Image (cartoon, helix red, strand yellow):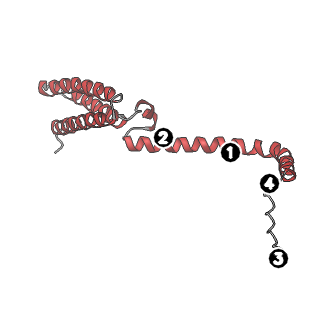
Amino acid sequence: MGHKNKPEAPEPRITPAKARNAIGVIKVIAPVVIPVLAPLAVRAASALREAYDRFRARRLGVSIDSIGEFSGRGARLHARISGIARELAGLRESAAGDPDRVTFAEQSEATLRQLTAAVRAAERMPAARRKAAHAAVAHELDAMENELLHRLGVA
């Protein structure tokens, strides 16, 4: 009768001897490599974080120094509110003799406080409601920015 040859099983890739050899190599190389690579890894992580912070600051339209003030899902809206508040303060200073401009600045600042509270409250809302609240706040900010530009004489 015929006798079939069974194919031999391939040799395992990792054998106990290969594992022992690898551990031995690591024990010799690690004390030399780790002190060299650790500072490089720290510098790379730091550079990556700095690049990400610059990206976020550019995206929000704020300086990199103030990026920490704006976080969360409403960060863009908070940044816009902050920018409008700065411009309103400038408008108030330049409008010492114009009561209409001062009144507009005071009313707008009160509205900004309400919008800030709305953005903060929206952080804890479900996604659909948060997006709707953010859209409403953005619409209000658009109208306020247009009116501010009009008051500043920019068409």
- Residue type (three-letter) at the residue carrying disc 2: Asp
Q: Residue at coordinates 60% horizontally, 42% vertically from top-left?
A: 45
Question: What crowding class fits label 1: few (fewer than 14 Cα within 10 Å), some (14-19), or many (20 or more)?
Answer: few
- Residue type (three-letter) at the residue carrying disc 3: Gly
Q: Earlier in the sequence, mark 3 or mark 4?
A: 3
Instruction: Choose mark 1 or mark 4, whichever is in front.
Output: 4
Q: Which residue is mark 1?
A: 40
Q: Residue at coordinates 84% horizontally, 53% vertically from top-left?
A: 18
Question: What crowding class fits label 2: few (fewer than 14 Cα within 10 Å), some (14-19), or many (20 or more)?
Answer: some
Q: Which residue is mark 3?
A: 2
Q: Earlier in the sequence, mark 1 or mark 2?
A: 1
Query: Which label sits on residue 133?
Result: none
Give the Cα separation between the discs numbered 1 and 2: 20 Å
Q: Are marks 3 and 4 in contact (CB under 8 Å)?
A: no
Residue 144's spot in the image, x, y percent? 20, 35
Q: Earlier in the sequence, mark 1 or mark 3?
A: 3
Q: Earlier in the sequence, mark 1 or mark 4?
A: 4
Q: Quadrant of the N terminus?
A: bottom right
Residue 44's spot in the image, x, y percent? 62, 45
Question: What crowding class fits label 4: few (fewer than 14 Cα within 10 Å), some (14-19), or many (20 or more)?
Answer: few
Q: Is residue 143 above or below residue 103?
A: below
